[in-house]
Amino acid sequence: MTTTVHEDIIFRLQKFFEVPNNGVVDDPPIVVTGQSFHIVHYVPGGNGVETAPDACVRPNVAFVPKPATSTVIPRPPGDTCGNPHARIMCEVAVGQSVGEFGRKCLSWMREPYVRAVISIKILEPRLNMQEPTIGFFYRTMMYNVGILGTLKKYSRDPITDPPGCNAPNLAAYQITIPISEVFWDPPFPIPPGYTPAIPPNIVGINFVIDLYRIQRVALQAQTP
């Protein structure tokens, strides 16, 4: 059974990835969805085993064709419905064990078409520690971001780790991912310096995930 904090964080993450669509909701160039809509993929190297991320980001087929119609040989991977494989995977854990959660996140990194994996682990509320003005229970959150095979780790305690994540738009607490990675669809072999093109109707060059906003969602989901 899922929880409010789990679903609220997933919903907020999806909104960050929708920003470059510039308000387009029908047939957007960047398709953002998640497990609630049964976007199932094959586990990389899992011999046909199926699983679904909490949220994922993939290109519209107007810009990256389905694997069945792709001219790239060998053909790119897709989800179980034949759509282009998601390029960004997001996983959120509240009650899930760290070991199990970590294994799932690392498995996504084995797929070359997955260009980034964001994982957020929310620990239990600190029942004896509350924000003085509003009364939210403090919760420790751990963030891991794998981008293009490079692991970046964000792990901050709201009490003891200065500088604190206490305002939006703090560079130390923002995750940036190039929008172009969603449209990763190289020929084979991949030419040196290959960079995916961003469709002209996209706004910006990077996704920006503000961890302060995620933190507020987690805090507000459980109050006294």
Image (spheres, rainbow, N blue to C red):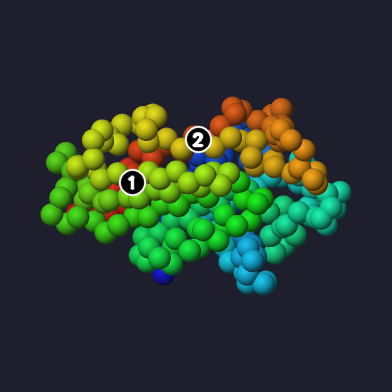
Mark 1 or mark 2: which comes first in sequence?
1
At x 64%, y 40%, the residue is: 181
Q: Which residue is mark 2?
A: 176
Residue type (three-letter) at the residue carrying disc 1? Ser
Horizontal and vertical percent position of residue 147: 54, 44
Nearer to me, 63 or 141: 141
Horizontal and vertical percent position of residue 138: 22, 49
At x 14%, y 41%, the residue is: 132
Label total for image: 2
Q: Give the quarter of the image for residue 212.
A: top left
Horizontal and vertical percent position of residue 85: 68, 54
Crowding at dot 2, Cα within 10 Å, few <14 / some 14-19 / many 20+, comes out as some
Q: Is residue 34 visible?
A: no
Residue type (three-letter) at the residue carrying disc 2? Thr
Q: Is residue 36 above or below residue 11?
A: below
Horizontal and vertical percent position of residue 110: 60, 57
Q: Give the quarter of the image for residue 160.
A: top left
Compute the Cα span from label 1 to label 2. 16 Å
Q: Which residue is mark 1?
A: 155
Crowding at dot 1, Cα within 10 Å, few <14 / some 14-19 / many 20+, comes out as some
